[in-house]
Amino acid sequence: MSAATADDRSDQRGGIPMRLHGLDLSYFTGKVHACLRAKGLEHEFIEMDTRDFRRCAAQTGVAQMPQLELPDGRWLTDSSAIVEHFEQACPEPTLYPTQGALCFIAHLLAACRALDVGATGVHSDAVQGASTKLGRAPSEAAQHRDAPNSPPAQRVGAKRGVCVVAPLGHGPAMAGAPRLAPIPVWLQRVPRPKPDRLLKDFADEWLWRPAMYYRWAFDEDASLASGRLARGLLRDVPVPVALRRLYIRARQRRLFLRGDGVTPATAPVLQAVYHDTLDALQGALGTRPFLLGQRPSQADLGFFGPMFRHFSTDPTPARLLRERAPAAAQWLARMWQQQPAAFEQAPEPQTLAAGLGPLLVMVCDDYLPTLASQEGGLKQGARQVNWVCRGVTFTVPVNPYQVHCLQQLRRRYQALKDAHRQQANAWLMTCGAARAQAALDLLAQPGSGQTIDRPGSPHDAARRRRPLDRQWSPT
């Protein structure tokens, strides 16, 4: 990504701010939104349609969201890279702890919850598929005529608290339910897909799979999400809204449930992961405003994406959030309203706060082993990989982006000063010596096999015939 060499706060040529391209139900668009607001950075929010999605992908070489268009013509994508860019370009107020070991732990938590794939599961193949299967994209005049209520671009004045983006909302209230929700009948009838039928187009973020499961496995949630996507991203496809809804619902269930290892055997694991995450967040946020202490950090931004735009808005997980983790629900509202004046004078954390142990246990037991299995699969040239989570085997495509994330964590860990590395080791050891040692051994390993770097400049994109998908694989 481009270095911070220009004023990224506003365009000196007419006062036009940076433009954030995404969707208002998008996982990682919400994360970047929160970062820009906390930094007090003025920006214009562009609600993507299929035409804008393709245009952004052509600029960055990656078909994902969000995409950020800077005032000087540069583009940024990958929400972690965007957050890091502004931490360097606009360092005050800082979102990164200055204590080295604590900053690494925050990155570890953020990486576990916020690996940067596309935001909704609707990416290049969906955009092209919608245009070809449902009809050719209309002209701009036809778009304006046929979709008079299409969401306009929104100017967001984030400086010192002014914002016009829709506020946090919850799904409708639902009656109480047991700890594990019943597996939908339609999913119970689906046989486990054969490995050679699994699509490579899947998401690599740890809470991504539970988020997509809750959004698309349950009829009420799927009906709400398909309607929003039909009227949002697909609003420029010239067919009735009902057909757009049918298309997107069928596609999401095919790719992100059946095609992403979600079966009657694995669905209870995904529910348990979400429930355990809620319980861990409730414990961590019950006594302080943010995960690390008195001010937000990249760890908060990492969890904010899935919690804000999926789990707090889709009806089924939203009910669970309110029941099991009211402190997390309050934290979401607190994160969304953050402005520089609210925390720039707050003390920076210097030690690991109490209550983060359960989250670190999930990092060691659930998340890092999946990265290791992905690295092994990529090194062997495999198309699919099996990994075991809580005694249940998932079969998913090999994902280059997930390997990149492991490589980044290794680089950060190995770059720590000796004293900070020893402190980070000691904090992880509080989760249990055996699991912590396995995690540390993985982080300490030298790089092996292919190095997966972020897609480069627009010149790199121009050399490709088609953009990479959200997993950084050729489309």
Image (spheres, rainbow, N blue to C red):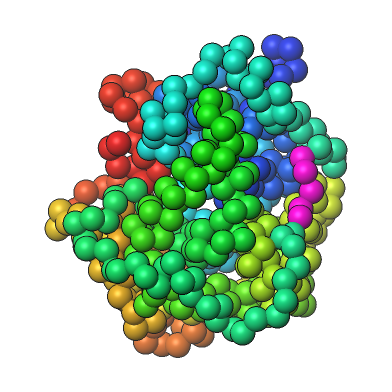
- Count of labels in the image: 0
Compared with 283, 312 (above or below) is: above
Side of 342 where 406 appears, left or right: left
Residue lying at 28% horizontally and 37% vertically, measured from the top left: 474
- Percent x, y for residue 266? 39, 74
Magenta part, dominant SS:
loop
Residue lying at 53% horizontally and 78% vertically, measured from the top left: 182
Compared with 19, 114 (above or below) is: below
- Percent x, y for residue 244? 52, 38
Q: Is residue 462 visible?
A: yes
Report the residue that reaches farthest toward the left. Answer: 380
Tell me where residue 305 sits by quadrant.
bottom right
| Quadrant of image for the N terminus | top left
Q: Which residues are magenta?
A: 165-169
- Percent x, y for residue 221? 60, 59
Of residue 366 and residue 273, the one placed in the foreground of this image is: 273
Tell me where residue 298 sits by quadrant.
bottom right
Of residue 381 and residue 121, the one placed in the foreground of this image is: 121
| Quadrant of image for the C terminus | top left
Side of 388 where 339 appears, left or right: right
Residue 166 lies in the magenta-colored region? yes
Residue 210 lies in the magenta-colored region? no
Residue lying at 41% horizontally and 87% vertically, measured from the top left: 433
Compared with 201, 7 (above or below) is: above
Side of 333 where 193 appears, left or right: left
